[in-house]
Amino acid sequence: MPGRLVLRAIRPSRALTVACLALSFLGGCQLFPTRPMRATDGLDTSTAVTGEPVALPGKNSLRRSQFVFYADFPFQQNSLLLDDLCDLREQLRDELKLPDGNSVIQVFIFENKAKYERYMQARYPELPRRRAFFIAQPQSRGGSDDLLVYTFWGDNIRQDLRHELTHAILHSVHKDVPLWLDEGLAEFFELPPDRDGINPTHLDQLRNPNLAADLDRLEKTSQIQKVMKDRSDYREAWAWVHLMLRSKPEARMVLLDYLRELRSTPNAGLIATRLRSVYPAENEALRQHLSRIDSGRVSRGQSPGK
Ligand SMILES: [Zn+2]
């Protein structure tokens, strides 16, 4: 399952913003703080990747929409995937009322996991092992960040790219998105459109009578710690986003208004207080919303990422 990672200036000498990574190896996304990464960030950095560093893929390139794809194999023939990713951009614009973002998002697709890992280990040794990364990298001459996505060709390519490109598209129009919200939106949109944002695995695990969802906690934790260590936080982030986008119009407007404010101010406050104008008991509203979702409708579909 993909996730996201936002690193801000891993090292002062190499300012770097990593906005997300797909979580195939650990099953969770992480947001990294503005300090050198340590094992205490909850990341698996123990397994060294051996072998000679490899170059970025670039024998084949293709510009589609806001994206430029690079690969060393003829990926252009995967027209359905490319169409899906271009549609993702339109889906985000329509659903979230995002303005046009014309920043180019560079997508590097390694032909296999081994080459991808060797490259990432050499280029970004601070990063944990993950299936994919989004990195917003400040340019040395200033201006807007370079928006970079790295991954490899594999069974999860569609889901991983949808997840990372959701982060990239958001970051192309927002300088800062709260971590929990960035992840919740990526978890929602990583699924094919016919899933309508429903993640059956998340749903199964959240449909617990003892569910202790708490948006206040989620917002404050991600705001203060800048790290989401627990996989359950990603599920809960997805659930709150699903509630706001798929329960009733007033809840959706809370999210859209919040995103619009974030485009003009990095400090739009907490969304929980706004959501209470729609759902005074928001935790109970979430529980009821999850119970009403028809997971059977999506369980008959194709697995995500295939
Ligand atoms: Zn993510």
Image (tube, rainbow, N blue to C red):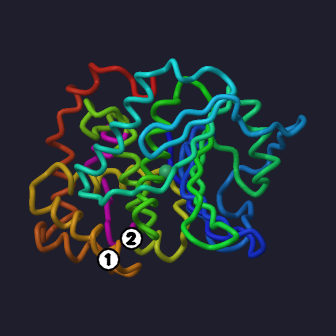
Residue drawn at x 70%, y 50% as measured from the top left: 128
Mark 1 and mark 2 residues within 8 Å of each other at the beta carbon: yes
| Horizontal side, residue 225 vs residue 202: left or right | right
Amino acid identity at mark 2 = Glu
Name the residue beneath numbered marker 1: 270
What x and y, as percent, mark residue 54?
Answer: 82, 37
Q: Which mark is residue 219?
A: 2
Q: Is residue 146 above or below residue 277?
A: above
Say whether disc 1 or disc 2 marks the residue closer to the N-terminus: 2
| Horizontal side, residue 265 vs residue 254: left or right | right
Depth check: give the residue in front, 217 or 114. 114
**Are there few (<14), some (14-19), or many (20+) residues within 10 Å of tag 1?**
some
The span shown in magenta is 202-218
Depth check: give the residue in front, 151 or 74. 74
Q: Is mark 2 within 8 Å of ligand 1?
A: no
Say whether residue 214 is magenta: yes
Total number of numbered labels? 2
Q: Is residue 135 above or below residue 70?
A: below
What x and y, as percent, mark residue 119?
Answer: 77, 41
Say whether residue 159 is magenta: no
Amino acid identity at mark 1 = Leu
Residue drawn at x 38%, y 37% as measured from the top left: 86
What x and y, as percent, mark residue 287?
Answer: 20, 53
Name the secondary structure under disc 2: helix
Separation of residues labelled 1 and 2 (CA atoms): 7 Å
Residue drawn at x 20%, y 52% as measured from the top left: 245
Depth check: give the residue in front, 41 or 257. 257
Tell me which corner region of the image, top left, top right, bottom left or bottom right, holds residue 50: top right
Name the secondary structure under disc 1: loop
Tell me which corner region of the image, top left, top right, bottom left or bottom right, holds residue 278: bottom left
Residue drawn at x 56%, y 55% as measured from the top left: 147
What x and y, as percent, mark residue 138?
Answer: 63, 67
